[in-house]
Amino acid sequence: MICPPELRKHYQDRRLIPFVGAGASMSVQWDKNGAKTRGPSWAQLVEQATTLLGFEKPDLARVRGTDLQILEYFKRKHAGQTAKLTNWLSKLMDPPDKDLEASSIHRELARLEKCNLFYTTNFDNFLERAFQLHNRTHKVVAVEAQMGGGYADCLIIKFHGDLDHPDQIVLTESDYEKRISLTTAMDHRLRADLLGHVILFLGYSFRDPNVSYLFRLFTDSFWDKPGSLPGQRAFIVVPDPSDFELELFAARRIQVIPVREDQQTEDITIGGFKFQVQRVNNGAVVHR
């Protein structure tokens, strides 16, 4: 992956905010009961909801509604709670420290020393655990009560909540509708943090339900305003993008950074994340 010079400069100027999606967590693999495993995808989460609801096949539920509507239905059928799903997630998202420490994406994120804000829509604790394993001091913010106060190095903002605060998780159709209004404490925090900063999306796809309203926020609120930061304000890493992704992301003013589908973890970590160092012929490491 080739890092655009403009993005590299934003990193050097401490203006870059990585925004980390489910693809980063799914890159982590570990052994469980003698087999390689990884955390569930969004599709697998929805399929688990349909199983708990009694559907024989997930597609029988998807014929009747969207994934978010299925999760809304699940919540309504369980007295307004999603505990059965979040408990299921908690049991599955448990890689040993050695496997999480070996994750190249998480290692390189922890090494982005000129970034002091990291956003994620993931519910798991992979990012903060990896930062601890790589000796990057940080503070986690998942609810308003955790905002404010000092922090030694950086903040990890759990934009959709986390498994330690299951009642605050953004998961269902009504949760997303509430966030689209951009009136919650987390929305206000993001709007403030975006001022003077540039976003790099990692681990997202165009189908991700997180993406549409986040892109709407960026496009509608932060471009072409008097005195705003000039140039490209958002970038996204996309494996083997087609004209479909290129056109639709361009319409949202998001610059696509392509990576190879079959080697995207290597592409991202070798070509993209290491903004801060460059190895020269004699083996020395110099800052760009």
Image: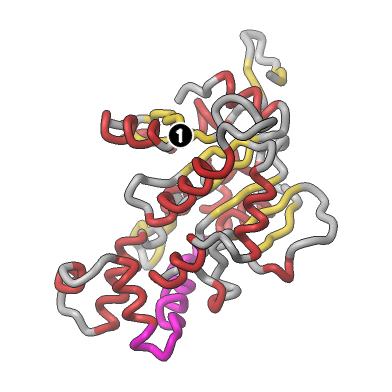
Image location of residue 85, percent across then percent down: 41, 77
Say which residue appears at 38% left-offset and 34% top-offset.
251
Q: Left or right: 177 with respect to 59?
A: right
Q: Nearer the viewer, residue 168 or 99?
A: 168
Horizontal and vertical percent position of residue 214: 49, 50
Q: Is 167 situated above or below 259? A: below
Q: Residue furthest front?
A: 226
Q: Position of residue 28 (x, y in %)?
A: 46, 51
Number of residues whose C-alpha sits closer than 10 Å to that of mark 1, classed few (under 14), some (14–19) or many (20 or more): many
Dot 1 corresponds to which residue? 254
Residue in view at x 36 percent, y 57 percent: 36
Q: Can residue 24 be seen at all in this image of the molecule?
A: yes
Coloring applied to the structure: secondary structure
**Vertical order, 162 against 251 (above or below):** below
Which range of residues does the magenta coloring cover? Answer: 76-96
Q: Quadrant of the N terminus?
A: top left
Instruction: Report whether residue 98 is seen.
Output: no
Which quarter of the figure is the C terminus placed in?
A: top right
Residue depicted at x 43% and y 50%: 211
> Where's residue 187, x and y in %?
60, 58
Tag 1 secondary structure: loop
Residue kind at label 1, given as amino acid type: Ile
Magenta stretch: includes residue 249: no
Residue at 65% x, 30% y: name it. 229
Which of 147/232 is in front?
232
- Identify which residue, 166 or 40, lies in the foreground: 166
